Image (cartoon, grey):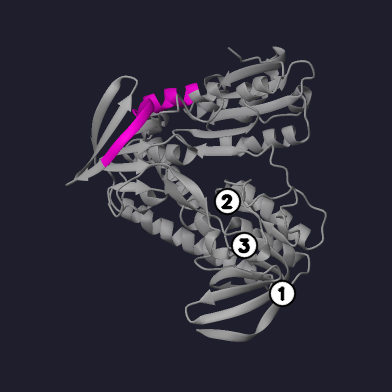
Amino acid sequence: MVVGDFAHEKDILVIGGGPGGYHAAIRAAQLGKEVALIERKRIGGTCLNESCIPSKLFANAGATLQSAHKFETFGITGSSSLSLDLSKLQHQKSELIHALTQGVEALLKKHKIERVQGSASFISDSEIGVEEQERFEKYKFEKAIIATGAVYQPDTNLPSGEARVLTGADPYELEELPEHLVLYGSDYITLEIAASFSKFGTKVTLILDEEKESFPFDQTLNRELMRLLKKQQINVYKKTKLLHALPKDDMVEISLVSPKGETTLEASHFYAMAQPQPNTKSLRLEAASIETTSAGFIPITTTTQTNNPRIYAVGDVTASGGLAVEAIKQGKVAGEHAAGENSEWDPDICPVIAHTVKPLASVGLTEEEALHEGYEVSTNQFPLASNGYAGITADKDGMVKVISEKETDVLLGYHAIGTGSVELISTAIQALEMGGRIEDMIYPYYPHPSINEAWLEATEGLLGKAVHGM
């Protein structure tokens, strides 16, 4: 191993080049700091290379293919022979990821951020070592930002090295469509995989584990989602214990115990939901006296600082992350605060989105959470079937639900499933972030005709003013 004779000096070192890391590096550089970003694999992290980007590409491909079913509604013919070529979709995925990673690399270069390839570990609370093959170099820093993310491991013991047993981002690497895909889990990642492959023509069965009667959203949204899954012909097993998933020749045998008794399913492929395991073991955090939880996650403050105020952490590696949107926000805050700005992040009012059978978006309190916190609430639901533009697009499945505090009219939560949910959730985020009331949402103009009007009438319905409400 070749060891450098001296330590490179930087104002700020960022460890990890995912969304949290590269946003942190760029914000610090924009504020005049000399920054280096250390990444042992590919820039963009799990989100860009394996998860967020591939999953949304597959979801869009599924939605595009499914839209062919309503072509005749608009007088469009000749669509009966449409099918998916998965190898071409994989090629598109590779090209998209390459273009996006090159884009991030160009941004780092534009902002004069040194890109360091290798594995980082702390030598002290002011020095980091970077190892890459036979090379080892030292870097001294004023501030450091940890953005090393997490790896995902399945909840249950599964046979390893089996092509038909999948977890994490494995489904987005398949070269052939499964004939029958059985999925074990209830999180948004599992839901997106189930929805995409169902739209591609795969038979899909979804198993909720023994603790789950439904999904982790507002119960009204869960009921609508369950209805849409059934409409998509996705069979759902509730409160079910997985006994085993055994590969046999060209299939997987899945043994289950549900409230209805023991069942055995045969599938071409089996997928199990995974849980994040923080990438902290190789960092030698103890050398910098950085505290972690029993599971290895790093606790952070509202300024994203660890217990060592000169060292920050953002994203999946923290005890306060898990979504790319959180990593990006935390990364910007870390970059700004490390550069001397007075910047903070707030874990509340963070949206959750999922591209399921229909797009789903949620922000703020669910009805159940609001009641549990002691609020007396008003709620209203507005079906997209009552929205004029949904009728124009022949895409009327879904609804919008809004929750407010009865006494003050302060908005507490928005939950939606259906066309436009992901794009329009930003309006709800802004309203909740500003402590908005019902009148703040219903006073402005809303374009007509548009899906926006469903969100308007969902809010108007809290006051009994929705013209098209059922």
Identity of the residue drawn at 71% across and 78% down: 9
Q: Which residue is mark 1?
A: 10
Magenta-colored span: 223-245
Task: Confirm whether the magenta stretch covers residue 96.
Answer: no
Residue 196 located left or right of residue 39: left
What amino acid type is highlighted by mark number 3? Answer: Leu
| Residue 296, x across and y down, in percent | 56, 52
| Residue 87, x across and y down, in percent | 32, 55
Which numbered mark, 2 or 3, is in the foreground of this view?
Answer: 3
- Report how far apart the C-alphas of labels 2 and 3 lie in the structure: 16 Å
Q: Which residue is mark 2?
A: 316
The quadrant where residue 308 appears: bottom right
| Residue 237, x across and y down, in percent | 36, 26
Task: Confirm whether the magenta stretch covers residue 233.
Answer: yes
The quadrant where residue 20 appears: bottom right
Identity of the residue drawn at 82% across and 61% down: 340
Which numbered mark, 1 or 3, is in the foreground of this view?
Answer: 3
Residue 100 located left or right of residue 146: left
Dot 2, crowdedness within 10 Å: few (<14), some or many (≥20)?
A: many
Q: What SS does tag 3 mark?
A: helix
Dot 1, crowdedness within 10 Å: few (<14), some or many (≥20)?
A: some
Residue positioned most to the bottom: 5
| Residue 230, x across and y down, in percent | 38, 24
- Report how far apart the C-alphas of labels 2 and 1 lie in the structure: 25 Å
The quadrant where residue 226 appears: top left
Q: Which residue is mark 3?
A: 285
Report if residue 182 is visible in the image. yes
